[in-house]
Amino acid sequence: MSVTIDKDAYKRRMEKIYKTWKEGFPNKETENTLSQVDAVVTLFTGGEIMQYSKSSALQTWLFGYEITDMIMVFTEKSILFLASKKKIEFLRQIADIKSDYIPPVKLLTRNKEVNKQPGDDSESFNTIIKAIKDSNNGKSLGVFAKENFKGNFVDAWKKKAEAEKFENVDVTSLFAYLMSVKEETELTIIKKASQVSVDLFNKYLKDQILDIVDQDKKVKHSKLAELVEQSLTDKKFVGNVDTAQLEICYPPIIQSGGHYNLKFSVASDKNTLHFGTIVCLLGARYKSYCSNIVRTLMVNPPEEMKTNHEFLVELEDTILQALKPGAKLCDVYNAGLKFATEKKPKLIDQLTKNFGFATGIEFRESSLVIAPKTMAQVKKNQVYNIALGLGGLKNTEANDDAGKTYALFIGDTVVVNEAGPATILTNLKKKLNSVSILLKGDDDEDDEEEKENEPEHPAPLVSSEVNVSSRVVRLM
């Protein structure tokens, strides 16, 4: 079966780019850097040690696929593609699309390599340069400034473009904002990715941790993370999705035993899982769209730890209430900070420096972070990874040195609604009865207190009773 492009989606999304270029944002939701450029040039090469890039994300958004070793150029009068013959044949599907907003497509074929030397594409480069110069004032290029791909093809183009002395303008944030508002088809995929994250945590990782605690096993964080990643495509754990289109957003992160770093860029270390406070981060990516879930499991948590965890859950609720269309992301952050200051002023310094970020084809959109200085406005159908943590906390009731310092971290994938609070897509309970593990002989609570702690409507994805048990009494 031949690979096809969703031509309707391509047309809608390319029209969105050109409308924004010409008209800007009606409500000035973010800076329109496109208005400052005469053309846009993107390129993407394969073989890079880079899971995410704006060029790759833009290609996936427009075509449904990454196309390596291709130059894509948007000008006032034409859209140009320069790639190998096979890739140009693939793109021929969109060559005849008609629109009042977007210009015609021009397909350029790269010359083949000769004796392992790159083909001479100077003629095609000249065609692109002429199209750029004929576009508006012909002097400035919109680029993704932080991307620095390497290779003979890329280097040859850069040399040609630099000789023309175009002014480069970074349009990364603008394209991030354009792609951040999801269509219904995209939301459907993200919901499936989110359910995979939930299932992987609930049906595999949580049970593994319970078994390790129950059997008093010695398992390294790195090994447990590796097992989680291996289970991603196991139908026993991930439900009714096409496992061939599943991948991990980042290597799962497991932390315990006093060593915590509440970031998604860290790796699980080789320390053995400590039966105290266990921070778990994982994210499933389905059909190129990301999701994420963060939970902290607590073994025999003391009252202060329980209270601090409940504070984080309430803080997340506050963020969800504030995450509404029209709100600035800095104001969403400030709403959370105001709640934290009033509720737990002594914990402000322990809070994570931001409360999450937009997600989609790229896991983390750095220009759309829920942080003090982000002025971009929230829009309906944006998707965010909410992530809230407390680090460097002290447990004075710990039985060993490894348990004396702890951290708490919770996170969910959420979607912005037209009105009302954002909706959690990783719908897995995180209140105390779902994340606390009690061991025999360690201050078991009586049945009445247990009943009081039970939710009125127990979460369907979390069992309140653990059916293992020489040591574990229950997952509360």
Image (spheres, helix red, strand yellow):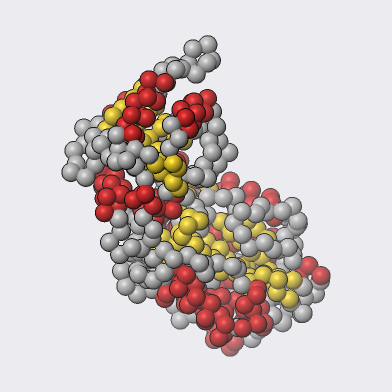
Q: Given the current orientation, which residue lies at the most extreme top position?
A: 115
**Which residue is drawn at the image coordinates 21% and 45% (left, top)?**
101
Could you tell me residue 309's position as x and y percent?
Answer: 60, 76
Could you tell me residue 300's position as x and y percent?
Answer: 69, 75
In the displayed structure, does residue 397 sit left or right of residue 197? right
Could you tell me residue 317's position as x and y percent?
Answer: 47, 76
Q: Given the current orientation, which residue lies at the most extreme bottom position?
A: 448
**Which residue is drawn at the image coordinates 45% and 81% (left, top)?**
456
**Occupied quadrant, residue 177:** bottom left
Q: Is residue 248 visible?
A: yes
Question: Total label count?
Answer: 0
In the displayed structure, does residue 400 sit left or right of residue 114? right
Does 154 sit above or below residue 461?
A: above
Q: Residue 405 or 14: which is nearer the viewer?
A: 14
**Occupied quadrant, residue 55:** top left
Q: Residue 358 or 118: which is nearer the viewer?
A: 118
In the displayed structure, does residue 44 sit left or right of residue 379? right
Does 333 sit above or below residue 197?
A: below
Q: Residue 323 or 431: which is nearer the viewer?
A: 323
**Which residue is drawn at the image coordinates 44% and 53% (left, top)?**
173
Could you tell me residue 275's position as x and y percent?
Answer: 72, 66
In the displayed structure, does residue 369 sit left or right of residue 400? left
Q: Is residue 93 visible?
A: no
Quadrant in which the C terminus is drawn? bottom right
Quadrant in which the N terminus is drawn? top left
**Which residue is drawn at the image coordinates 67% and 61% (left, top)?**
261
